[in-house]
Amino acid sequence: MRCLVTGATGYVGGRLVPRLLAAGHEVRCLTRDPRRLRDVPWAGRVEIVQGDLVEEQDERLTDAMRDVDVVYYLVHALGQAAFEDVDRLSALNLAVAAVDAGVQRIVYLGGPAPSEKTASPHLRSRGEVADIFLRSGVPTVVLRAAVIIGSGSASFEMLRYLTERLPVMITPRWVHNRIQPIAIRDVLRYLVAAATVFPVPLNRAFDIGGPDVLTYAEMMRRYAVVAGLPPRTVLPVRALTPWLSSHWVGLVTPVPNRIARPLVGSLIHEAVCREHDIAAFVPDPHDGLTGFDLAVRLALRRIRDADVETRWANAALPGAPSDPLPSDPAWSGGTVYRDERSRTVEAAPDQLWRVIEAIGGQNGWHSFPLAWSVRGWLDRLVGGVGLRRGRRDPHRLYVGEALDFWRVEEIVPGELLRLRAEMKLPGQAWLEMRVALDQRGRLVYEQRAVFLPRGLAGHLYWLAVAPFHAVVFGGMARNIARSAERLPLTETADVSG
């Protein structure tokens, strides 16, 4: 089959594409920014087309669906202020384009069916998108999943950090609502099968879930057992509303408030499968669906082995600037603040590059750890992402993935790493690190921080932080050079300095 995958830069889409290829399908990926798929391992085996689901009458969207059999809709605007409106418009635009292009099937991964009038905005939006596709005239299969357990998923990261960081938890009442979590491996098995197993006229939704029905409190306790942690104590409190809970989750876990809020809002409702009809088309494996304990064990193994395939944070941050670093002529006449530093390095270019590419996450930022931590906490207090997103792989980066409160905007292996800030700022900021040679042929580490202020607040911000640059950025350049000089040519594991 020829499949079009929307959301290929996201958590599920980035895992689905290689599995569709392994099943023998042709894959085309629709993305607003093709650069974000440039470095993924399977980029050379798919067709990447540019288009925007939010833009009405975008001819590129219809063109992307030409000769396509199955369209996978794996995008949502979770985290945006008006995510319901954006999701609605995106679904309507895709449905119209699918009809015009003669698509045979739409496959949508949604959330549990909202059964109450008081359903959270997140679940209402998921249900509305499902209804749009089911009424579009294109045969549609909707897979309704609750909590997805897998390394790097937002739901798993919430569970993991809450359990590991808090041996005694004061929790809201919703921790006693029943949930039927599902392992990411089973979600992907259903999605791959959806390309071929359903008869074309079929137009309906299916509940999908794992074999265990648990409360969130039971999930935390069982996670602690699997992870080898001491028993966790859960103390429910009436006063913790979903709004307060989201701030609590945002403070303790890497998931920022604006994403935690809709996720927590959905947990106030029970999410248990009402049917398992999908087994008539996709039979359960001979050893059964993946249980909760095994799903956690597999996820933790991936994290321990630094083999996390995709992460929730690698999806584009809603509302974040996406423009690349502008050239100086485009900004002539405007204010551009810079902090530029360079150091001669007595090492081989490969040694310096390995230190640069391994920056951030557990490896740190090579200068004044307290200052970086404080900046991360301040960002989280104002609703930003903070430092805890970390990095997917301890040694390798690719364009588009998150790196603490930065995103990789450009990477030229052995030469350049450019990061774009996604912290809360009154302007836009970038950090560049280069491997270069001076006129005498000596190896030089070049570092440049660029800030484009927005309004008076932007100028005041730069003036306030400029006194710390000598310590933070100066120490960073100095320590990166030293780390490269101490790194043997045969060393590949420890580049944290």
Image (spheres, rainbow, N blue to C red):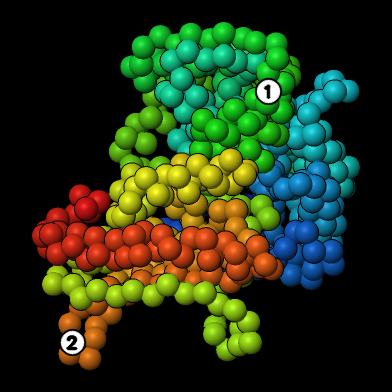
Q: Is residue 171 left or right of residue 300?
A: right
Q: Residue at x 56, y 42 (%)?
A: 380
Residue under circle 1?
267
Element type at marker 2? loop
Q: Residue furthest bottom?
A: 439
Q: Is residue 473 left or right of residue 452?
A: left
Determine which of the numbered discs, if any, sits on residue 371 in the image.
none
Categorize mark 1 by other alpha carbons within 10 Å: few (<14), some (14-19), many (20+): many
Q: Are marks 2 and 1 in contact (CB under 8 Å)?
A: no
Q: Residue at x 60, y 53 (%)?
A: 424
Q: Tell me residue 338's x, y (percent).
A: 47, 74
Residue 338 shows up from this direction: yes
Q: Tell me residue 18's x, y (percent).
A: 48, 51
In the image, residue 497 sits, relative to residue 346, either above or below, namely: above
In the image, residue 20 sits, relative to residue 252, either above or below, namely: below
Which three-letter amino acid code belongs to the residue tagged 1?
Answer: Leu
Q: Is residue 69 left or right of residue 125?
A: left
Which three-letter amino acid code belongs to the residue tagged 2?
Answer: Gly
Element type at marker 1? helix
Residue 208 versus residue 204: which sits nearer the camera?
A: 208
Measure the alpha-carbon separation of dots 2 and 1.
60 Å
Categorize mark 2 by other alpha carbons within 10 Å: few (<14), some (14-19), many (20+): few
